[in-house]
Image (tube, helix red, strand yellow):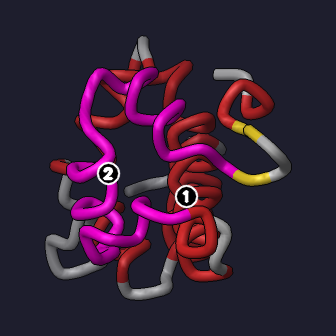
Amino acid sequence: MQIAQYIEGRVFSPARIATALRTTRTEIASTLGLGQDAFSRASRISARKTQTRLREMVEILNRVEAVAGSQLAAYAWFRSEPLAGFGGMTPDQLVREGHADQVHAWLDRVMAGGYA
């Protein structure tokens, strides 16, 4: 997953991300806990909260893709795999609550051969 392919006009493009993941911008917004209008206007797309959540998701998917086998499998994992030690929360739930750093720390442990 080349992160640069998701950039358009110096911001992460929800449309490009949705196309790559074979989904809709509405689903991406919902997955990230953003309102339906988050991707409707350029000012909302470039908002700090929107860009932060898009970046965090892309970074996590990028790390997981090699292990998952594809972008689509990484996205499915992101949305549905409960992480041990987080009360059954999924990566997307953690990102929505502002804990992307904890997902990265979990991935660091697992990828280094530690326990999930």
Percent coordinates x, y for residue 31 in the rendering: 26, 60
- Relative to 6, 69 lies left or right: left
Residue at the right extreme? 10
Q: Residue at x 32, y 51 (%)?
A: 28
Residues at marks 1 and 2, CA–CA distance in whole angstroms: 9 Å
Range covered by the magenta-colored residues? 12-41
Label of residue 54 in the image: 1
Q: Give the amino acid type for the residue marked by disc 2 in the picture.
A: Ile
The residue beneath circle 2 is 28
Q: Is residue 50 magenta?
A: no
Which one is in front, 101 or 49? 49
Q: Position of residue 113 (x, y in %)?
A: 57, 42
Snapshot quadrant of residue 46:
bottom right
- 106 and 60: which is toward the camera: 60
Helix, strand or loop at mark 1: helix
Residue 23 falls in image quadrant: top left
